[in-house]
Each structure stands twice: as structure tokens, then as C-alpha cells.
Image (cartoon, rainbow, N blue to C red):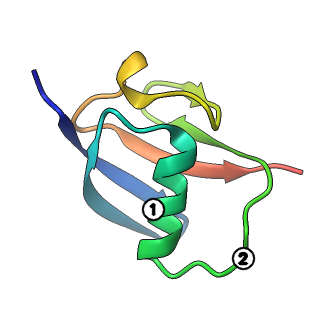
Amino acid sequence: MNTHINITLDMGETSKDLRIPLKISVKQLVMELDSIFSRTERRTKYQLRVINKGILLGENDILAHHPVTTGDRIRIEEFY
């Protein structure tokens, strides 16, 4: 059983290839990514979009509970 997957994080004009754990919530993942990429603004409401599958995940969703797999392209979408 895989514990990690390789994904592409879509960051607008750029993208980053990353290896991330499956047993992580969207909230934990976003906090880690914000820390890694030195984002100083605090996010209030957001969701994770799996672009190539049309899946939306909320803050409390666990990646392992959804069909997010190696090769997927994801984007953090903020809404107000």
C-alpha cells in the first residue's frame, strides 16, 4: 500500500512537482505547503481542487479517503 503520492501543485503561473502523504487532511497539507513556500497571508476559506479529476476537497477531508493518486494535478482555491 502506498503511503505517499507524486502530484503537481498548480500555483498560477508556475507549478511544482511534490511528493505528499496520503494520510493528511487538506487543512494540514495546505498549512505545510504555505510554510514551505513562505506564504505569509493566512487563508480563511479554501478548498483543494484535483484539476484532472474534477474533485473538490474541503479542509477536513483526508486525501486517502478520496481517489487522489500519483500524477494528479491539484490547486488550492480560496473563496470569500
Residue at 20% x, 39% y: name it: 4
What residue occupies the far left of the structure in this picture?
1
- In the rendered view, tell whether residue 55 sits above or below residue 4: above
Q: Return the residue nearer the eye: 33 or 24.
A: 24
Badge 1 element: helix
Residue count near mark 1 (Cα–Cα under 10 Å), binned few <14, some 14–19, many ≥20: few
Can you tell which quarter of the image residue 24 is in?
top left
* Residue 80's disc number: none
Q: Earlier in the sequence, mark 2 or mark 1?
A: 1
Instruction: Give the residue number, with chain letter if any, for mark 2.
Output: 41
Q: Position of residue 6 (x, y in %)?
A: 21, 45
- In the rendered view, tell whether residue 68 sits above or below residue 74: above
* 40 sits left or right of 69 in the view: right
Residue at 55% x, 65% y: name it: 12
- Residue type at mark 2? Glu
Q: Position of residue 53 (x, y in %)?
A: 44, 25
Instruction: Give the residue number, with chain letter if any, for mark 1.
Output: 32
Q: Position of residue 55 (x, y in %)?
A: 54, 24
- In the rendered view, tell whether residue 55 sits above or below residue 20: above
Residue at 60% x, 28% y: name it: 56
- Residue type at mark 1? Glu
- In the rendered view, tell whether residue 41 sits above or below residue 28: below
- Cα distance in 3D space between marks 2 and 1: 13 Å
Badge 2 element: loop
How many numbered marks, from 0 up? 2
* 10 sits left or right of 46 in the view: left
**Image quarter (top left, top right, bottom left or bottom right) of the N terminus:** top left
Q: Position of residue 41 (x, y in %)?
A: 72, 76
Residue count near mark 2 (Cα–Cα under 10 Å), binned few <14, some 14–19, many ≥20: few
What residue occupies the far right of the structure in this picture?
80
Residue at 27% x, 29% y: name it: 69
Q: Are marks 2 and 1 in contact (CB under 8 Å)?
A: no
